[in-house]
Image (tube, coloured by chain):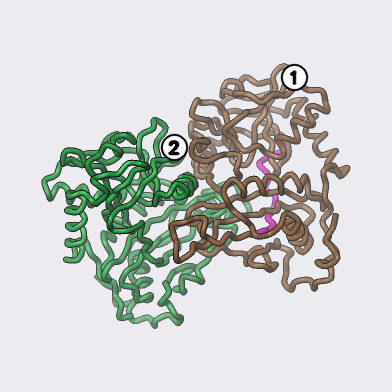
Chain colours: A green, B brown
Amino acid sequence: MSLDAETRTKARPAGDFSAGAGWADGRYLPVAEITVPILDHGFLKCDACYDTPHVWRGLFFRLDDHLERFAASCRALGLDPGLSREEIRQIMLMTVGLSGQRECMVQIVCTRGLPDPAAPRDPLRNRNRFYCFTRPIDPFGADDGVAVHVSDVVRIPPQSIDPRIKSFHRGDFTRALIAAQARGADTTVLVDLDGNLTEGPGFNLFVVRDRALKTPEAGMLEGVTRRTVLELAAELGLPAAEGKLSPDDLREADEAFMTSTAGGVMAVTRVDERTLSNGAPGPLTVRLRELYWEKKAAGWHGTPVPYDI
Amino acid sequence: MSLDAETRTKARPAGDFSAGAGWADGRYLPVAEITVPILDHGFLKCDACYDTPHVWRGLFFRLDDHLERFAASCRALGLDPGLSREEIRQIMLMTVGLSGQRECMVQIVCTRGLPDPAAPRDPLRNRNRFYCFTRPIDPFGADDGVAVHVSDVVRIPPQSIDPRIKSFHRGDFTRALIAAQARGADTTVLVDLDGNLTEGPGFNLFVVRDRALKTPEAGMLEGVTRRTVLELAAELGLPAAEGKLSPDDLREADEAFMTSTAGGVMAVTRVDERTLSNGAPGPLTVRLRELYWEKKAAGWHGTPVPYDI
């Protein structure tokens, strides 16, 4: 799938997009020039949703799954990006094409936008805004394993904010992350109000015990890579379940790993003071990771970016 | 207090500030031109704090109390606006002076800023940013009373985000507000995890029963107007306590009112289907409201804005 004929015939926008491209207010810009009006409620009230597929070796991975989740997030918040799904898709392809980047994250955002001066306290009167931009893929840490701190910070609960809607309500993540890094860990996992594990800043969590996978069932974003791993586990004939996961389930796991769009499948080799799977990625983690990259390299769920713009 | 000699001798920045002024990146701009880089974590991760004093009849109200709370919010999040409290104060005075506005809100914001490309997952390496801008005072509703819906949305709990830090984590407010407006109410009050009342979008709540005031003790921002009303109650010899407040305490109150910087003291005359104090502001609400405006008109806690820039 590439850009349609009409888009292709348009002139290439002027500018140097090699450090990242973006789209806002109807035009393409270098990412460093993409800004949000300070009065946009996406900023002032964290009233926005987003999604972030990635491009690897010039292919979007599961682009349509991300577009579908983005549409669901918009619907849930009563936001309208003012563009059809196909238009958003074309903007994303064009943005990455302009950047020339073979590896990047591609973030799409719909904000509540500026309030109606005649009804500044009625969110449904705001004029919603759509943004798209590329940014570098930030790895979580070394391929040989990540050290995780189990936080006592509670992930913002569903009674307040639905975690399945991808939003910028992340102050709990940031607070827990700063504390984890001060303890020498790479990242952190947050708990729910009952003390069960939920998710970390930008990733889902899996544990392996007796060759069976388990991942939290609620209180977190339902990640696209999480779903991918559940599919890969089925392909490998590994039992995999969603359920409650306590901090002790993690500490006493045979193996554990994180999943994220930015990093794929990443081994957890330390949980606070405890070493997991002898301090190296466990065998099933490695198997799933290899299968994930092998299948992606073969074009699985891939959408080619048009770089010949 | 007005601008110091050095600031006064500088040339007035060029531009039309009459629709609102702002300060960003070291210079004054019309508010419509103030933008946030889309990569600022203040936007992408809701990683920011703010405060919003107001100006009425050319006087800031309790400017130093707002500056103190802003400093406390920054400290709690590990944010550094890169300016002294006195410098922030001068920027705020100058911003309003440039706008010429006699009545406005003045918002100051410190964001986490852009990540360090060498350590994009370490929030403490970001370069924090400071913004200041004016915006219109948005009244909550008519002077003769506001209709409130008691929401079942839970205000983001302190286990996740400390509500005493003034931040943009407001998606719970927005969700509850949209539901309240769909039911015909003007605004809404959110509960905590135990079902007790906390606060609404931009205001604290008080109830009056047997000539005694009560306001929630935890789970909400400790508003400057809330503190002001506690002081005014003491001046009037009215007992006033912080404590747990249930939805029934509100429904069965003799009177109730909201407090906010934007509106001062505002009577609640309807709670869902129930009419309070015969549908008109109650006598103690009126007495407190009058005293609030009388004292402000006399310059109480007032800081004059220098309009002769």
Q: Residue at x 71, y 49 (%)?
A: B67
Residue under circle 1? B211
Helix, strand or loop under label 2 = strand
Residue under circle 2? A152
How far from the left and from the top, in percent, is residue A242? 25, 38
Quarter of the image for residue A150 reads top left
Locate residue A149 relative to residue A235 in the image: left or right. Answer: right
Which SS does the magenta portion mostly show?
loop
Locate residue B86 relative to residue B172 in the image: left or right. Answer: right
> Cα distance, mark 2 to mark 1?
42 Å
Q: Amino acid at mark 2?
A: Asp
Magenta highlight on residue B9:
no
Residue A78 visible in this rendered orientation of the protein = no
How far from the left and from the top, in percent, is residue A38? 59, 59
Identify the magenta region: B131-144
Subunit that carries the residue with mark 1: B
Subunit that carries the residue with mark 2: A
Q: Amino acid at mark 1?
A: Arg
B131 or A263, which lies in front?
Answer: A263
- The correct choice, above or below, for A293 with respect to A211 in the image is below
Locate residue A224 relative to residue B22 in the image: left or right. Answer: left
Locate residue A278 relative to residue A161 in the image: left or right. Answer: left
How far from the left and from the top, in percent, is residue A254? 22, 41
Quarter of the image for residue B275 reads top right
